[in-house]
Amino acid sequence: MSYWIDCSDPGKLYGSSRQIPFWASRVSDIQNLPKVGIPGVQQGDDTVSCRPVDAGSTCTVIENSTLWVLDMDDNDWHQL
């Protein structure tokens, strides 16, 4: 299990929106990501990546080079 916040654009991390860009090692990591009002699975001492996020957050999965987005209609992650 491995996912982390993409810190390449600090403006996205410190803005008023919690639309957070993530990276994940595997597709199976998607189930551990946070959602709107729901924290993700905490990984070790990382208490930031697991905080709840806003709809529109994204995750790039390295395993198969796919992009996922958190949908506001059902508060679930979907592959684009």
Image (cartoon, helix red, strand yellow):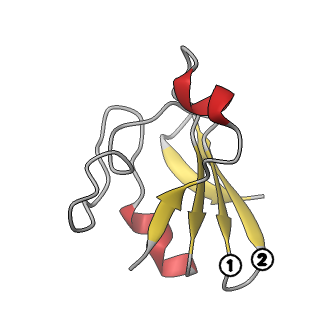
Task: Name the residue at 61% across, 47% down.
Answer: 7
Q: Position of 64 compared to 47: left or right?
A: right
* Marks 1,2: beta carbons within 8 A: yes
Q: Position of 64 compared to 3: left or right?
A: right
Quarter of the view holding residue 80: bottom right
Q: Residue furthest left?
A: 45
Question: Mark 2 sits on what residue?
Answer: 65
Question: Mark 1 sits on what residue?
Answer: 62
Secondary structure of the residue carrying tag 2 is loop
Question: Residue 36: x, y in percent?
Answer: 41, 34
Using the image, determine if residue 70 lies above or below residue 27: above
Question: Residue 37: x, y in percent?
Answer: 32, 32
- The residue under label 1 is which amino acid type? Ile
Task: Name the residue at 78% across, 76% down.
Answer: 65
Using the image, determine if residue 52 lies above or below residue 61: above
Q: Which mark is residue 4?
A: none
The alpha-carbon separation of the residues under discs 1 and 2 comes to 5 Å
Image quadrant for the N terminus?
Answer: bottom left
Quarter of the view holding residue 73: top right
Task: Name the residue at 57% across, 39% down.
Answer: 20
Q: Residue furthest bottom?
A: 63
